[in-house]
Image (cartoon, helix red, strand yellow):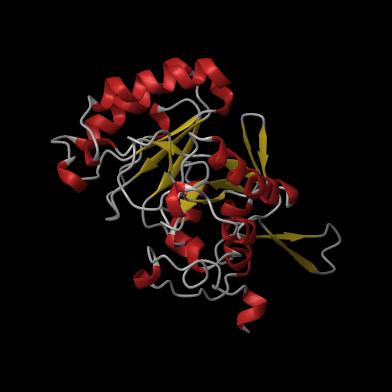
Amino acid sequence: MEGYKVDGQEENNSHQMTTQAPIPLLTPYKMGKFNLSHRIVLAPLTRQRSYGNVPQPHAILYYSKRTSKGGLLIAEATGVSDTAQGYPDTPGIWTKEQVEAWKPIVDAVHAKGGIFFCQIWHAGRISNTENRCQFALEVVEAIANEVGADRVGIRLSPFANYAEAGDSNPKALGLHMAQSLNKYGILYCHMMEPRLKTGWRKKKAFNGTFIAAGGYEREDGIKAVAENQADPICYGRLFLANPDLPKRFELNASLNKYNRETFYISDLVIGYTDYPFLEDAA
């Protein structure tokens, strides 16, 4: 990659040798007990293809196509109860049928050496109202006590204003939450940032792994990791359209374009499992 070369010369000066320094996004990272081979994370993407809130077999292909050995994937937001729903056909994990449906998906990711986190959610204002800070911290504490803080992460979206959920001071809200989470020693904080390049990042406020997200492209991610503004970077739409995104970033190859019109349609192939790999697109 341009700008990441180191030129060296043998002692006898007989010839010059060029060593390619690693691309920051493609460097290993130790996230607690998990050894990531690179820092390109699949973002949790709502796909609305889990009919009746049950994950479908096509999700095996969807997730396994985006799995690389040592890569981190975060599953689409998964409901914790039938009262937590805000959108149609989103997956759940509160019934035996749902749990059993997730198992082959998880097995497929693990078979390729991937690391898979389930993002559990409650749709919040869409189905209920709550004290955003107190409630979130109570949930974090309860889950950490149940499964261990080293297996718990959280996604924060202080800048979101959907469903009239905007905050009057989102920067202060994000900072307060990042600092408050340190008490529980959880594994990671996944922070959604404004898509406008404002330079707002709060990695230093959080003691664990800080995952940044918010409209990043290849060079943005490289810069954020190189400048220690984030640890891994979450990619959503680019990873959706490019199941081999780490390879494409490594080669600085061209990217498939995503199609917004197919983000949330009910089709199990179109806009879901039909985006080609680099070699298939050639």
Say how many tags the image has. 0
With respect to residue 62, does 116 lie above or below?
A: above
Left or right: residue 18 compared with residue 3: right
Residue 65 in the image: state x and y as whole percent: 63, 62
As rendered, which of 96 and 146 lies closer to the eye? Answer: 96
Q: Is residue 153 above or below residue 279?
A: above
Quadrant in which the C terminus is drawn: bottom right
Residue 115 pos. (x, y %): 64, 43
> x%, y% of residue 49?
45, 58
Q: Which quadrant of the figure has residue 182?
A: top left
Seen at 62% across and 64% down, the residue is: 250
Q: Nearer the viewer, residue 3 or 44?
A: 44
Does residue 180 appear in the picture of this structure?
no
Judged left or right of residue 6, residue 241 is left
In depth, the one of 71 and 273 nearer the eye is: 273
Image quadrant occupied by the N terminus: bottom right
The residue lying at 43 percent from left, 15 percent from top is 183
Q: Tell me the residue at 45%/17% (across/down).
A: 142
In this view, the residue in front, 28 or 167, is 167
Residue at horizontal 16 percent and vertical 34 percent from the top: 169
- 172 displayed left or right of 212: left
**Image height of 229 relative to 250, above or below:** above
Where in the figure is residue 39, as x and y percent of width and height? 57, 48
Please, which residue is most extreme toward the bottom here? Answer: 282
Visible residue check, residue 149: yes
Would residue 200 be found to the left or right of residue 121 on screen?
A: left
> Relative to residue 9, is residue 193 depicted above or below?
above
